[in-house]
Amino acid sequence: MAANKKDLKVVGKPFRKVDARSKCVGQTKFADDVILPRMLFAKLLRSHVPHALIKSIDVSGALKLPGVIAVITGKDVPIPYGILPVSQDEHALCIDKVRFIGDPVAAVAAIDEDTAFDALDLIKVEYEPLDTIANVDEAIRKVEPRIQEYGDGGNIHKKVHLEFGDIAAGFAEADLIREDIFFYEGNTHLPMEQHAAVAQFDADDKLTLWSSTQTPHYVHRAMAKVLEMPPSHVRIIATPNGGGFGGKSDPFNHEIVVAKLAQVTGRPVKIALTREEVFYCHRGRHPVLMKVKTGVKKDGSITAMDFQSFLDGGAYGSYGVASTFYTGALQTVTYEIPRYRFRGLRAFTNKPPCGPKRGHGTPQPRYALEIHIDKIAEELGLDPAEMRLKHLVPPHSLTANYLRIGSMGLGACIDKVVEASDWKNKFRKLPYGRGIGLACGSYLSGAGLPIYWNSMPHSGVQLRLDRQGGVCVMCGSTDIGQGSDSILAYIVAEVLGIDPFDIRVVTADTDLTPVDLGSYSSRVTLMTGNAALQAAERARELLTTAVAEKLKVPASNIAFADRRAFDVENPDNGVTFAQAVQLAEAKYGTIGTVGSYTPPASAAKFKGGGVGPSPAYSYSAGVAEVNVDPETGIVIVERIWMAHDVGKSINPVLVMGQVEGSVYMGLGEALMEEMTYRANRNVVHKFPSLLEYKSPTTLEMCDVKTFLIEDPDPNGPYGAKEVGQGPLLPIPPVIANAVYDAVGVRVDEVPITPDKVLAAIRAKERGKDGRYGPSSVPNIDWPEPLRVATPDEGGDGKEVPRELVHARE
Amino acid sequence: MQKAHIQFNVNGETAEVAFAPHKTLLEVLREDMGLTGTKHGCELGECGTCTVLVDGLPVLSCLMLGLDAEDREITTVEGMAEGGKLHPLQETFADLGAAQCGYCTPGFLLTAKELLKENPAPTRDEIREALAGNLCRCTGYIKIYEAVELAAARLRDEDVEVAAEVLYGCE
């Protein structure tokens, strides 16, 4: 790309975000800040039982309460929806059955929030309780009652079995075969902003919804479907999200409910969820039980890996099928794994649905893998840093499961943190109670395939150039705090030689902006960045031709910088940027361009191969130094050194913010955060509040030393890859590995709470295994594997036809 | 329900407001005065998001009745800038990436403002301690500390350069 060769004026510089001022003066309008004339307020009546048939709902009492304008129930919004085409299993309000405590059954619109709240007490719901399914074991054991009427039988939502290459041959080559079992407890996003939405039918009877959503495009589709409206009559505006982390990526019942209530009442309707309700929206980290078996040579090279995962999905599908595949997809992108088998199961349980949280389905297996590698290194007597470095996946290669690796800076990341942390003088050398650990990770820069099958671009950008010199960038992307609005401005400013603050950014409005699929899978910088680059280069071309004619120099001589277009050989010979637009407008008419981005075709052609491919993979390595009190089991993380291969920083300050934020969130998952339920039949959330759901405050947050590694990827704009999620991945295992170095016990389960550390220390003192964690996984019937020959075996990315498989056997 | 009718001083202006007497200061500010810069994260006093200054001290506006604000001086994020000029904390939060989603930012800004008034040269640990009641899910707090430190230096009229490590990462 020509842009890469020039001196960059904006890209790579620590500019302020375009919306930073607004956020620091209180001007940013979040969803709950949208206030409209005649606006009503909605509240949801949520089930207080975990699993029951709805025998009757009587709303007459609520309707009589002065100030109540409307009450709706499931029969008013009967069409199901869901984020994935294969899981259209949600209703905005439950119709005949509730599936978890918090499932909504009725909604009230009233003149104020207090009245709506009071009205909820006047709705009478008669439930007929059903037996509950509280966890994966129960889901496997209890075929009836079924939580959902679809899936892979009983309360199993999904079972998958993929085999890449001749696994048995791989294990036969191994000098050492090791098996480990891990459990990763579920946890939740906990964005500081509770979800809120406002719906209004405009004068022309078209719907506008303002909502704190990361995925306005998918809300648009679900809304049109459920309300049976032409999509062209539905406008979704994603307000700036007060934190998302994946928790605002599904179309939600409350969004559809306010739209329906606005339709019924003819007035704008707002809903603002309470913190407790946000816990019931969930879609957070799946609790996952995992078993990993790996064969290695004496030098630590892997000959084969066999990975099993069991996901506790909660009551609905959500992104769960994708989550299931993600627990098996990215094991192969860090260290070479020539043959690989993955088996995954997702169960339905009577709990709020799990879904995508930062790292979507990959922090759990990464936790397992990085501790497993640490144990293997110890068994082989190798330094875990050196062992990893020796067997890295090569750049520009294809993995056994057909993921196409581009730039790969993990080696540089490991080198950096090993050096900075003085690893070689500390590992296994610190006094008892102090320890150091290392772990790595990798993540997608955007999912290679869309959620619903189509061959259109994943990201579109439209540019409008104004004869006054202004530029407007329009894109469907949603700023959830990561700075995606700013990335658009930086890239367009770079190409057109103007200041990013000259640009107006209009985003996340399905009426005004071209589709971008949403702020998920760390796709935004790469995909909208490429789309913006294309649109800006097309605009520059128009301006260049017009300016070259005016200046009477070859078009190849025209450069753009400092709000001017000029002849590079005689920089004084030029025009202002506004004049350049005027010349182009006189020549071509109104100046507007578009750009779009579609990821490269995936090499994985087998069923299930849609999850894992990405235009580029980011890499991270972390070292943690911890202090463990053997008397209490309390773990204090003192410092984390984190190196992240971001390809190229479009803005290093924003990249650092994502690294530090990921380290923080990983630390919370590692040490304290857990979304857990009372173990009795009630399946009630233990602590749906910010006080009792423990997350790190300033006092628990560790010191972080951030290193940005730039190994530009040919698929990224200016070489940029993702940073929003990847740096979280090494954190839980790095702390577990450091705890082992400190006190010699393995905690194979997150969160690593003091009671677990202490139990392992005491077990070790009694001469038992110094370990805390699960000891077995369910023994189930897996489906026949879908077999794919690896690239090394001459495979073509397609599954081996079943007859051929049998013939070979 | 009979509305309470009180007078208080918000951001240097005298305001008269009528509201249901059970409303919290948070609700009165947001719903009755249109000052939506003050955010809410729990409405139970757990997260610090709704922090405002009452007579100069940080207060969780979700735990204070609007009635108790009578005749007191309230400062919200909208009142931090003076004469169109942003408070140094607002500038440094914007410049150093201390505001990611920006939702917790008003609470942090006001808590930090009070800290710097009491302690113009706080150590990292003193900043940590002062901000321990405010939760942020985006930043990991580090950019917030750096912004507070830079604003503190500027308020002391020190001519400080931002360390390269803060803007570009460690070497």
Image: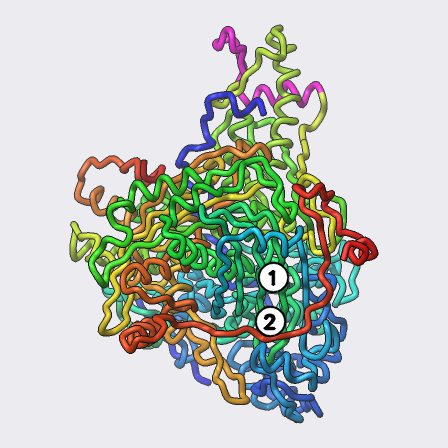
Q: Is residue A185 above or below residue A246?
A: below
Task: Determine the CA span between mark 1 and mark 2.
Answer: 9 Å
x and y percentages locating residue A261 in the rendered image: 67, 72
Q: How is the image coloured?
A: rainbow
Q: Nearer the viewer, residue A733 or B42?
A: A733
Q: Nearer the viewer, residue A394 or A545?
A: A394
Which residue does the image show at 32% across and 50% down from the upper left?
Answer: A704
User: What chain is tagged by disc 1?
Assistant: A
Quadrant location of residue A107? bottom right
Q: Is residue A95 magenta?
A: no
Q: Which mark is residue A313?
A: 2
x and y percentages locating residue A386 in the rendered image: 39, 44
Q: Is residue A575 magenta?
A: yes
Neighbor class of circle 2 (other Cα within 10 Å; few <14, some 14-19, many 20+) is many
Tell me where the magenta segment starts and ends, as one range: A565-587
For badge 1, the amino acid type reads Ser
- For residue B146, side relative to residue A524 (left or right): left
Residue under pointer 1: A323
For badge 2, the amino acid type reads Gly
Neighbor class of circle 1 (other Cα within 10 Å; few <14, some 14-19, many 20+) is many
Q: Which mark is residue A399?
A: none
- The answer to whether the residue labelled 1 contacts the one labelled 2, judged by CB atoms less than 8 Å apart, is yes
